[in-house]
Image (cartoon, helix red, strand yellow):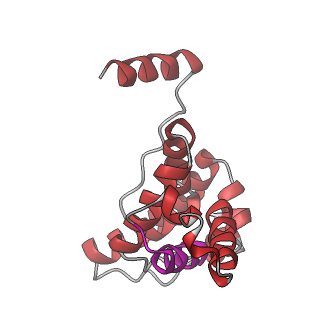
């Protein structure tokens, strides 16, 4: 996100002078289908903690990043960004509200469970510990628990990667 923001700033600075005819805009060279304003807006939404980013804004950002960042870095980074404890909690709450509208979920909050709402603290909690504490609160509310699956070993990860590469 920071690389994209720096690139946009450089593009804005270069478009302010009269050298538009000399070089193709560097941003357009990286992501020819994306408009700079659309990417700027998508970056602002991605930086905020709101979950209300539209699919089109994410598509613009993903298209830009796919062009600017190597796939072997982009895909795992995107996967990690989407699997934080914070995003997991938000998705879990949305699903519980949809499937259990009769339940009072007012005590199922990050503050009640972890004594903080700070994303950096919540995301730093090991996944097993995070799920254990969330499941304790869900158990008290008679809600379905999230399974805690152990992390795969290095050899299991190697097998999974080999199978993924083979497809």
Q: Is residue 88 magenta?
A: no
Residue 85: image location, x then y, percent:
57, 59
Q: Nearer the viewer, residue 116 or 49?
A: 49
Q: How many circles with numbers are drawn on the protein?
A: 0
Residue sitting at x 52%, y 33% = 150
Quadrant including the C terminus: top left
Residue 135 appearing in the image: no
Residue 66: image location, x then y, percent:
47, 50
Residue sitting at x 44%, y 74% = 35
Is residue 56 positioned above or below 26 on the image? below
Quadrant of the image occupied by residue 38: bottom left
Quadrant of the image occupied by residue 22: bottom right
Q: Is residue 42 magenta?
A: yes
Extent of the magenta region: 34-48
Quadrant including the N terminus: bottom right
Report the magenta stretch's main SS. helix
Residue sitting at x 59%, y 58% = 133
Residue 151: image location, x then y, percent:
54, 32
Residue 8: image location, x then y, percent:
62, 71
Quadrant of the image occupied by residue 166: top left
Q: Nearer the viewer, residue 12 or 155?
A: 12
């Amino acid at each position: 996100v920071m690389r994209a923001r720096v690139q946009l700033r450089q593009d804005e600075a270069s478009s302010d002078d009269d050298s538009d005819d000399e070089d193709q805009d560097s941003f357009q060279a990286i992501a020819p289908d994306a408009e700079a304003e659309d990417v700027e807006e998508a970056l602002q939404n991605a930086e905020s903690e709101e979950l209300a980013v539209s699919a089109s804004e994410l598509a613009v950002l993903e298209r830009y990043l796919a062009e600017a960042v190597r796939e072997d870095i982009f895909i795992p980074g995107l996967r990690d960004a989407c699997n934080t404890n914070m995003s997991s909690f938000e998705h879990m709450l949305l699903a519980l509200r949809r499937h259990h509208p009769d339940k009072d979920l007012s005590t199922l909050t990050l503050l009640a469970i972890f004594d903080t709402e700070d994303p950096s603290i919540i995301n730093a909690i090991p996944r097993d510990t995070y799920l254990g504490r969330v499941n304790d609160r869900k158990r008290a509310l008679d809600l379905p628990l999230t399974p805690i699956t152990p992390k795969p070993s290095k050899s299991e990860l190697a097998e999974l990667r080999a199978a993924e590469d083979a497809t």
